[in-house]
Image (cartoon, rainbow, N blue to C red):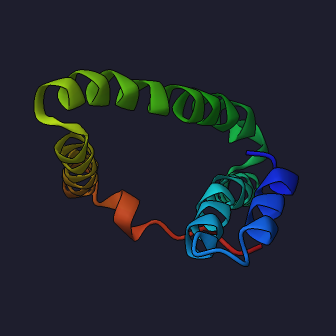
Amino acid sequence: MNPTVEWWCVSTSATTTRFPAALAVRHTSSQPERKSVYRSSMLQSVATDEMRGRMQGVFIVVVAGGPRVADLWHGPAAAAFGPGLAATAGGVAVVVAAIAVVARYPEFWRFRPSRG
């Protein structure tokens, strides 16, 4: 959603009972931009010059492809079990997968970027 449209929604609903909902929409829709800045900053500060192009390629694949993989899961699961259970199961699956990756590759957990 366009930030101008979002703030218009918030300002026009300030006198109604929908203000908390409009404010929540404004807050949650700004999160992807913030996360994008953090991801890009980490990628640029941690990756060496030799690895930056490869890392950027992986970054594009994950950012562009990750949500599509989730769509493949959530669509049929929501049709079969309902959207709430499908979303919850997807979130639990991500947490379990992250724990499994860290358990298998503990160097991910121990990694700290060099300063300098």
Where residue 57 sits in the image (x, y, percent)?
A: 65, 28
Q: Nearer the viewer, residue 65 or 71?
A: 71
- The quadrant in which residue 15 appears is bottom right
Residue reaching furthest front? Answer: 16
Q: Where is residue 64 shown, x and y percent of the image?
A: 58, 28
Residue at (21, 46) in percent of width and height = 93
Toward which corner of the image does residue 61 lie, by quadrant?
Answer: top right
In this rendering, is residue 23 above or below 46?
Answer: below
Residue at the far left in the pictured view: 81
* Depicted 3 relative to depicted 67: above or below: below
Relative to 29, 9 lies left or right = right
Question: Which quadrant of the rendered structure holds the C terminus?
Answer: bottom right
Q: Residue at x 71, y 68 (%)?
A: 13
Q: Quadrant of residue 80?
A: top left
Q: Tell me the quarter of the image containing the N terminus.
A: top right
Q: Can you give x and y, in whole percent of width and height, for residue 31 in the image?
A: 63, 60
Residue at the spot x=22%, y=31% of the render?
78
Location of residue 51 in the rendering, given as x and y in whole percent from the top left corner: 68, 39
* Total count of labels: 0
Q: Residue furthest right?
A: 4
Left/right placement of residue 111 relative to residue 27 reads left
Q: Residue at x 22, y 57 (%)?
A: 99
